[in-house]
Amino acid sequence: MNVNTLKMSLRTLILLAAITMVAQGVTAELTEKETAEFTQSDGSGYSAIGAGIALGLAAIGAGLSQAAIGSAAVGMLAEDGSKFGVALIFTALPESIVILGALPLFL
């Protein structure tokens, strides 16, 4: 990897962490009833964390696979422009991974 790419990735990670910390401080104040519902120990918080992790990891996996597939598709199109449909299908296939990762959010 290029050093500039690593620096940019680190800057982006630090920026996202800062935004997350600011967003936690800006959350709305809960009423007593909402606080009681929120602090129940029935494991509902863990299911939300699990769904978020599932979606995040699915998106990361799809992004990594689309990086390789996209460059291969561009190379294929450079050699033979008539294979645009095949390149488009292969490039769009990893998005189904994100859709399947989003299913736990609705279940």
Image (cartoon, helix red, strand yellow):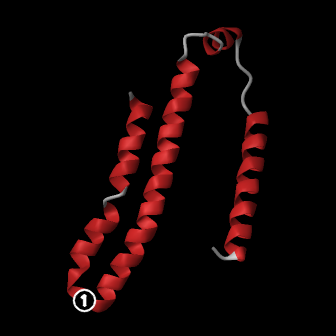
Dividing the picture into quadrants, the one containing residue 23 is top right
The correct choice, above or below, for 28 with respect to 12 in the image is: above
Q: Which residue is mark 1?
A: 80
Residue at 63 percent of width and 16 percent of height: 38
The correct choice, above or below, for 104 with respect to 30 in the image is: below
Q: Amino acid at mark 1?
A: Asp
Question: Looking at the picture, how far across and down is residue 39, in whole percent?
Answer: 66, 13
Which residue occupies the extreme front position in the image?
1
The image quadrant where one finds the C terminus is: top left
Dividing the picture into quadrants, the one containing residue 14 is bottom right
The image quadrant where one finds the N terminus is: bottom right
Residue at 70 percent of width and 14 percent of height: 31
Q: Secondary structure at mark 1?
A: loop
The correct choice, above or below, for 52 with respect to 38 in the image is: below
Q: Is residue 61 left or right of 31 when viewed as pictured?
A: left
Binning the other alpha carbons within 10 Å of mark 1 as few (below 14), some (14 to 19) or many (20 upward) gives few
Residue at 68 percent of width and 64 percent of height: 9
